[in-house]
Image: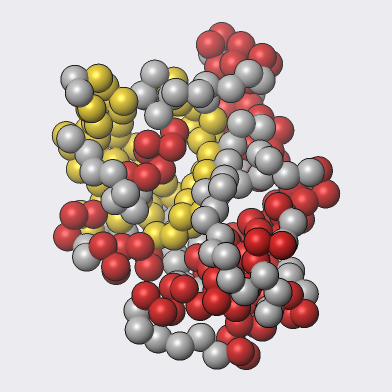
Amino acid sequence: MSYAIQFQNMSYTVNEQSILHNISQHIHASAITTLIGPSGAGKTTLLKMCNALLSPTAGAIYVDGQAIDTYTPTALRQKVGIVLQNAPILRTTVYHNLALPKHLHKQQLTEDEALQILEDVGLDEALLMRQATDLSGGQKQKLAIARTLLNRSEILLLDEITSALDPHSVQEIEQLIMKIRQKGITIIWITHNIEQAQTMGDYIWVMAQGQVIASGTTSEIINSSEPSIQAFLLGGKQ
């Protein structure tokens, strides 16, 4: 079985406070793994570890079997893209927002490439020269996803990307993520929505107090007889 990311006795401590503690887990390649758990469980910290926005204070992380600290930052962040809940949008056109990853690598984004990626994420080509700040919340998230995909990332990290969107926009983003998954891209998705985790995830990790307290296929976690897991799932409070 192929693993996209492996955590080996990985911990993260700040000012003597343990944020993540002794995590040894693996992320299956070409699948969606959702991370759920209460606020402060360490989910976002774990996600940032995956593309070295943060580095572990103990243990190791492997990306495609290679120690994460042996990648250059540029190579790693091309391979492992991240989309945040409030993705930074430049106060310029949609085109110039899309062109940013290419610009950082001293490359040019052609209009044809830009129009193709808009089509891929379900944005109208007429938006290309519109001001990005004028887009709706759902359109901004699609733009952020498109910008990340231009790096041809093999692993996509998603942090609460639908939590601020209306139901229609949530549905559109979920459909887009399923389309991306079909291309073999590995996806790690933090969500506070238990139903979303259940319908979208191939695997679920339940996190609490900086640890992964349960992990398995979505069916295994949803049908778990473990009282603490069932209480969490039924409560739905994250």
- Examine the rendered structure and indicate whether residue 96 appears above or below residue 222: below
- Examine the rendered structure and indicate whether residue 81 appears above or below residue 8: below
Q: Residue at x 23, y 43 (%)?
A: 55
Taking the image as shown, residue 21 lies to the left or right of residue 70, namely: right
In terms of image quadrants, where is residue 21? Answer: top left
Q: Position of residue 233 (x, y in %)?
A: 63, 20
- Examine the rendered structure and indicate whether residue 174 appears above or below residue 104: above
Taking the image as shown, residue 191 lies to the left or right of residue 47, namely: right
Q: Position of residue 193 (x, y in %)?
A: 66, 32
Taking the image as shown, residue 151 lies to the left or right of residue 165, namely: left
Q: Residue at x 68, y 80 (%)?
A: 129
Q: Residue at x 77, y 75 (%)?
A: 124
Q: Residue at x 18, y 54 (%)?
A: 69
Q: How is the image coloured?
A: secondary structure
Is any atom of residue 230 visible in this view? Answer: no
Q: Position of residue 9 (x, y in %)?
A: 22, 33
In terms of image quadrants, where is residue 208? Answer: top left
